[in-house]
Image (cartoon, rainbow, N blue to C red):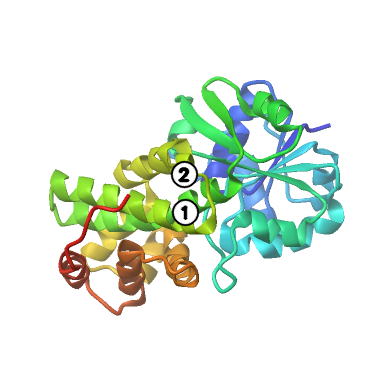
Amino acid sequence: MHTIAVIGTGTWGCALASLLHSTGAEVLLWGRRQDMVDQLCEQRRHPRLGEHPLPPDLPMSADAEALGSAETLIWAVPTQHSRRVAQQLQPHLQTCQRVVSVSKGLEQGSLLRISQILAECLPAHDFWCLSGPSHAEEVIGGHPAGLVLAGSGPQGSELQQLLNRTPLRVYLGHDVLGVELAGALKNVIAIAAGCVDALNLGDNVKATLVTRGLAELRRLGRAAGCHEQTFAGLAGIGDLLTTCYSRHGRNRALGQALALGRSLEDFCTQTGTVPEGAWTAEAAVRLGERLAVELPIASQVASLLRGDTTVDQAITGLLAREAREEDL
């Protein structure tokens, strides 16, 4: 019996499955594409995780029936594909299974968070989310990382102990809404941070951008009913800093590419991936409008991704905003 099934063979799914397996957990890595699972089984290496191999005895499968025996499901499916995969898997899952999401973003069109998507598709399951500053490249390399496990119910401490394996340090929280909104919007801010880096605008601008980006996270969270302290923690400022500064950040790399004149389509073709911030930017702006919250940085990023503005115009637009008191 596999205690944990990691659903999703992207970099984060592979990194988590590898680390949990190496620390003694019973883990199954599941992918929806048989060809990708076969490639991972044969090469024991994810193409975007560099020199870090997967454990030689880590079980992998593309058979949905294999998920039925797991006690805990770790959901590592990109947000935009989560609804389809959840609907596909629902007949094969058990209602007693706990679902822990590590996905980030807002679904385009519906503007739903991952917990809301899964609640619609897997309504009988207990849901938790795990988030914080944790790039897959560092986690699979065995570097320590601090995360917060957010949810409610009597199984919180048990889940925390299951996932709190050296070198992971897992804290327990209760604000699923705040953790998910922070995880979604920080990727959008990271695209702007990449633009700043590519244009060599300096430390002052970068610090201002990150600070004002945090203010946007907090404003949106406050209007949605989140706990204020969430944004001062690992899932808030912690994840925002990592995403905006790390060389591993795909959203930051997308911002760099856009500032250097490359298109979103060109970046995605070359890297073989779509950073979550590219999907989330427009959805975040729409959610802000629904909640009557102004998100100036996210709005400029969404406009840039649509091709409605240039990086220079976006910067000018932000600097030309009316002077006001510093709202936090």
Q: Which residue is mark 2?
A: 228
Mark 1: secondary structure = helix
In this rendered view, identify the residue nearer to me: 170 or 15.
Answer: 170
| Amino acid residing under circle 2 | Glu
Query: Could you tell me residue 34's position as x and y percent?
Result: 70, 54
Please say if 179 is above or below 268. Answer: above
Question: Mark 1 to mark 2: distance in Å?
Answer: 7 Å
What residue sits 22% from the left and 63% below the top?
A: 259
What residue sits 85% from the left and 53% below the top?
A: 92
Q: Quadrant of residue 203?
A: top left
Query: Could you tell me residue 149's position as x and y percent?
Result: 60, 36
User: Position of 39 compared to 213: left or right?
Assistant: right
| Amino acid residing under circle 1 | Arg
Q: Quadrant of residue 258?
A: bottom left
Q: Residues within 10 Å of mark 1 (few under 14, many from 20)?
A: some
Q: Which residue is mark 1?
A: 222
What residue sits 61% from the left and 39% below the top?
A: 174
Mark 1 or 2, nearer chain start:
1
Mark 2: secondary structure = helix
Q: Determine whether label 1 and label 2 are within 8 Å by CB.
A: yes
In this rendered view, identify the residue nearer to me: 139 or 172.
Answer: 172
User: Position of 295 compared to 100: left or right?
Assistant: left
